[in-house]
Image: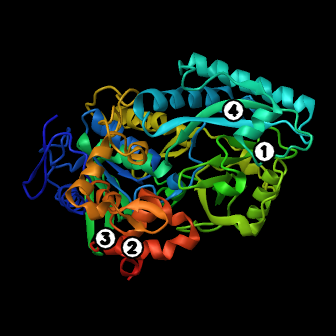
Amino acid sequence: MASTTSAEGTPRPAGDPALNAAQRARDLRAATADTGTGTGTGTGTGTGTDIVVIGGGFTGVGVALDAASRGLSATLVERGDLASGTSSWSSKLAHGGLRYLARLDFPIAWESAVERGRLMRRIAPHLIRPVPMLYPLHTGVGRLEAAMTGAGFLAGDIMRMLARTPKRLLPHPRRISAAAVRRLAPATTSRGLRGGLLSWDGQLVDDARLVIALARTATAHGARIITYAEATGIERGRVHLTDRLTDETHTIRARQIVNAAGVWSDTLSDEVELAPSKGSHILVRAARLGHPSAAVTAPVPGHFGRYVFAVPWHNGLVMIGITDDRHHGPIPERAHPDGAEETFLLDTINAVLDDELTPEDIVGSYAGFRPLIRSTGPSNSTGASGSADLSRKHALLRDPRTGTLTIVGGKLTAYRRMAEDAVDDAVKTCGLPAGPCRTGGLGLVGKGTPAPGLPEHLVSRYGTDAAEVAAYGDADPSLNEPVRKGIPLTGAEVRFAVEHELALTVEDVIDRRTRWGLVDADRAELYDAVARIAPELITQSRHEG
């Protein structure tokens, strides 16, 4: 692949995935110079870029990667940080579609199984790993419900086999004893426990990290990634934006505009009508649940196929979620569960625990919003929302006034297929001379066999890039020290986030590159510590001012 060239005339090495403030500035200048400096068909045509993508979540970066890897010039603009919307507030699971089997929605279940397999085998095996999913069989689970759930697990396993995901990654589901249940999840109630059903699914090391890896891979294929750039208006072939770091206004010309703004998509196109669904999680210390090694599944009473999961995560935390409630009104920048949602999550998971959790056990929380397509179905109360029954199918909607293509709906696991469909449509409609889709087998940065001797905690989060992170500590041993006592986040990781992962603010580092900021009690001290290590980072007060 040929090198890209910035508006300053500075060549960028082919395949270089580094993202940082300097590269952002070069990308912004090149994209808005209106001289067609892209690497694809936009080169030298004066049309700016082939595709402009609005939105830096899973779908948006997926579109940018798909387009750039086909040889098109692609520019992505995002009003905040990468993954700062719904894409960083998920359950961190690459689901195989069990809940869709329960609703007999076989196409969505099949798509989920296929895309999960691609992620785990080819695209990001370093960022997605198997997780055991435990369904305790206690007095609250009747024999018929247990049999139907077991049948669903078997159907999911058949789809796993048809999708050619090997059983070494996702073993066959099976019935286990009560003693085995307690070994995997020590806090599970022993009252009336007659065993459990054990299945396997995919778990992301972190959803935000996967988005960052997608963006860096897109960059390596020539895409421009410009964060903190808000699209303020769309005309046919033009996107007007404001640089939120400088308040300067710019225009990018494009042959196709793709609106991948998720739950904010309807603010950019009159053709989009959404029924946002709020998904909330609470965080508790893993020690409070006996350090479980499996995700515990608790059925929502009266709603077959709906569950609350207690999922072991890194940083000594367990995530408990998820709600699925219709949301009305403006979408906040940062959302948390309300009191009713916390109560619903606690009540549902407590039904399978010996020692019930209380609100005092909650050490952090978060909520995201799914961009579901509007339905005329009823809206119900917390824990029994009509949103749970809305389709997770994605849709392509073209605005006849501006020609903007909106990709909306769908689910995390299917981001790649959504991106493929969007670029296919753009290529066909605009006559773009693109190659075939390559993302089904295209590995992300960090994939591969890491060098021997690297710290395991780095390898588990960075893959082969762990060597570059460790190099910061080799050059300056002080960067190997934790930034704050009790939190094993090192200065080397902070520097890597700033110089390679486009972290521009302190929040970008603690909330999305590392996730240590999710624990409320740690946040203030961690904020100050990161600001000292990387003083060039913008603080929230400076950014808002």
Whether residue 324 is visible to the viewer of this picture, yes or no, is no
What is the crowding at mark 3: few (fewer than 14 residues within 10 Å), some, or many (at least 20)? Answer: some
Q: Which mark is residue 98?
A: 4
Work out which quarter of the rendered image holds the N terminus and state it: top left
Residue 69: percent from the left, percent from the top?
29, 34
Q: Earlier in the sequence, mark 4 or mark 3?
A: 4
Q: Earlier in the sequence, mark 1 or mark 2?
A: 1
What residue sits 21% from the left and 57% below the top?
23
What separation in Å lies between label 1 and label 2 (alpha carbons)?
38 Å
Q: Earlier in the sequence, mark 1 or mark 4?
A: 4
Work out which quarter of the rendered image holds the C terminus and state it: bottom left
Q: Nearer the viewer, mark 1 or mark 3?
A: 3
- The answer to whether marks 2 and 3 mark residues whose Cβ atoms lie closer than 8 Å is yes
**Between 179 and 206, which is closer to the camera in this rendering?**
179
Whether residue 401 is visible to the viewer of this picture, yes or no, is yes
Q: Which mark is residue 533?
A: 3
Q: Which mark is residue 298?
A: 1
- The answer to whether marks 2 and 4 mark residues whose Cβ atoms lie closer than 8 Å is no
Q: Which mark is residue 529?
A: 2
